[in-house]
Image (cartoon, rainbow, N blue to C red):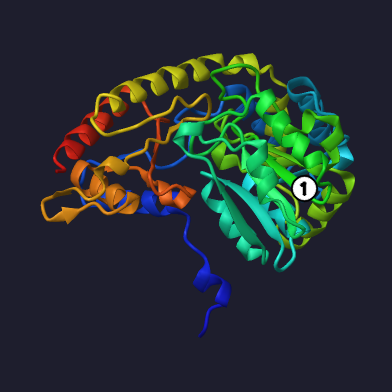
Amino acid sequence: MELATRLKTMQESATIAMSRKSRELKSQGKDVISLSLGEPDFHTPQFIKDAAVKAMENNFTTYTPVPGYDDLRQAISDKFKRDNGLDYGIDQIVVSTGAKQSIANVVLSLVDEGDEVIIPAPYWVSYIEIVRMAGGVPIIVKAGIESDFKITGDQLANAITAKTKLMIFSSPCNPSGSVYSKTELQSLAKVLINNSHVTVISDEIYEHINFGSRHQSLGQFEEIKEQVVTVNGVSKAWAMTGWRLGYIGASSKIAAACSKIQGQFTSGTSSITQKASIAALKADPAVLKDMLTAFHKRRDLVLGMLNNIEGVKTNVPEGAFYVFPDVSYFYGKSFGGITINDANDLAMYLLNEALVAIVTGEAFGDKNCIRISYAASEETLIDAMNRIKIALEKLS
């Protein structure tokens, strides 16, 4: 049996692969600390779980409309207005089984064979493979640690061609934690105004995990509103990763296209998840204060410990729950017969030598970095950072 060619060229998600490897070591009795997955270590708030139970008791257990229940889409519309100043009617909103499916729906709706898709690096691991699956050509625009991992309007303008169909980026960013300010987004918007053939997927799944000023959405600029697809969901801020619900706000044309595609793949999202998500979306984001405070404290803890390791270079991420340090100082160094040639080698070295699972930056488009998730207890993080320090100091 021959598998499809697309599978032969598709890369496995690096975060999922590292998680699998760490589980294998744990099954062998190894004391592995996993800082590889982007999953909050908090539990879903009780009021959301209560809404799910009530939905089951009220027999919301049947098939759902493909784009989502109307009352959920209305709650999303209200949330967009309240938190983002965005005006999307319910016919412009499509609910999916996670933000990942939302992004895939949009890409499959817009990208034809040979179309170019601009992706600022570092980027979330799945962007590249989703674009390739649709036959698109990823155009990578690099932004290093010196620029806080954010591209400029000039860089965007230089990357756009007649073949450009789409751009995908996230703010707050996975993996860097970088957050675009309103001024920085405006510089991108000014370029897009003159390139109406380009649509942008603005991935805002980490919106509420923001340690600086108020979150800013690219879609707020009226002149480019029709060119922007805003992606969000409940997984990260509301600790609902297993519930699987993401959504888009987009032009009516794109929303209808996404609904058509989804109707042939998964149909509607779980009825119970949808009803639970209404409770989350209607809640005041202020209830997330304790979680946000915990993440902020953990970020400072991890940064402080990393900055005490010679050769590690960091920026100060203003959102999400990752640090993305530059570790290129260690390339060419060795210990115990192992030579570190790149970030892949360093990730495996830390897994085997320190028993700490992180993710290579190459998976996110930056060969000089590694991604460390600090979605873990302070005690666990202190242990992990000490292990990493000892392992890195062995390299010479």
For label 1, count other residues whose C-alpha is less than 10 Å away and answer few (under 14), some (14-19) or many (20+): many
Callout 1: SS: strand
The amino acid sitting under disc 1 is: Thr
Residue 163: x and y in percent read 74, 60
205 lies left or right of 218:
left
Relative height, residue 260 to residue 377 (above, below): below
Furthest-bottom residue in this view:
1
Q: Place residue 155 in its image quadrant.
A: top right
Residue sitting at x 34%, y 25%: 302
384 lies left or right of 353:
right
Residue sitting at x 53%, y 26%: 319
Residue 29: x and y in percent read 20, 47
Residue 92: x and y in percent read 85, 41
Residue wearing tag 1:
199
Relative height, residue 374 to residue 4 (above, below): above
Q: Nearer the viewer, residue 197 or 336?
A: 197
Q: Quadrant of the C terminus?
A: top left
